[in-house]
Image (tube, rainbow, N blue to C red):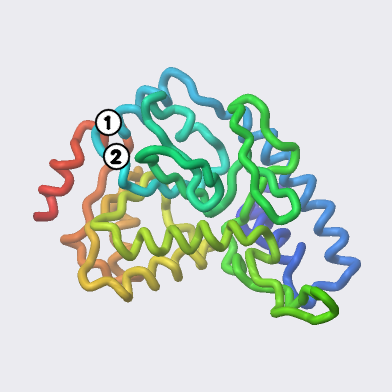
Amino acid sequence: MLKGIDVEEVFTFLSERNRAPRTSIQFQAYTKKVWEALLSEIGQVFARFRPNVDTRRVFRTFWKNHVRHWDTIVSFNYDVVFEYSLPYRCVWHYAAVDSTDRSRPLRILKPHGSINWEETDGEISVEDDPVSFPIMPIIVAPTHLKFIGTGETVVENGAATQPVVGYLNQSAHMADIWGAMENAMREAKGFVFVGYSFPSSDLYFSSVLRSALAVRKSHPFVVIVNPDSMAIRAKLHSRFAIPLERIRSFSDLQTFNQTTRSHVIQMFE
């Protein structure tokens, strides 16, 4: 019965109708209940995915061969397998969320939220215990309406301020995360996409990528690590006008880990 249903489309529809402008009060109340139930269930399901011997081996090799402390890691995953699989000596933090002052930290940006994040009075807190997670985590759907405001205004001292703007009025931190990601993409020498297949539903990320490419003086080098890497390579070339000679592909992360950062850079020189 569920075979013909696109999960991403349903997910996106619920998130948009939950807070989008011009949604009736009755329908909004209904979708809010469904959305909250969905968030709780997503948190419980993804909490089952935990670091293990295999993930630690793969991601620690990835960290050793390809990652430097000045890099920025962008993860669209809700789970925390990657960050908690890194070596203990690897100092990292959630950029634009965790304000902890750390020495030479690796920045991790999670534009779609994380199962260990929780919002209270507009502020995002991080649950540091990798075993205990919030009942209502921050989850952002892959939708093109990430930053539409509802038109509501805030009244302070009897005066109305500008309309509230953010991911459907979610925490302003989410806008900070997306802004930090776009700035990093404008400055980065290269992009490495691991497992991201550019889904058609995530139009907003595509627009951010296009915006970042438009202001660059030169094309970045792009590495695609995906079983469908050749098709994605063609998609990037046709949709974003990235020259094919600036794109390299690998079928999986294990294969990519057999190379080194310096070797990958040499492939583009």
**Apparent side of residue 235 relative to residue 136 in the rendered image (left or right):** left
- In the picture, residue 125 is in which quadrant? top right
Q: Find out whether the residues at labels 2 and 1 contact each other: C-beta distance under 8 Å.
A: yes
Label 1: how many residues lie within 10 Å, few (<14), some (14-19) or many (20+)?
some
- What type is the residue that disc 2 sits on? Val
Q: Residue at x 74, y 43 (%)?
A: 136
| Residue 247 visible somewhere in the drawing | yes
| Residue 3 visible somewhere in the drawing | no
Spot occupied by residue 77 in the image (x, y as percentages of width and height) = 52, 44
- The answer to which of 211 and 231 lies nearer the viewer is 211
Check the image and name the residue furthest to the front: 157
Q: Which mark is residue 67?
A: 2
- In the picture, residue 236 is in which quadrant? bottom left
23 versus 102 height, above or below: below
Q: Which mark is residue 64?
A: 1
Q: Residue at x 54, y 45 (%)?
A: 98
Label 2: how many residues lie within 10 Å, few (<14), some (14-19) or many (20+)?
some
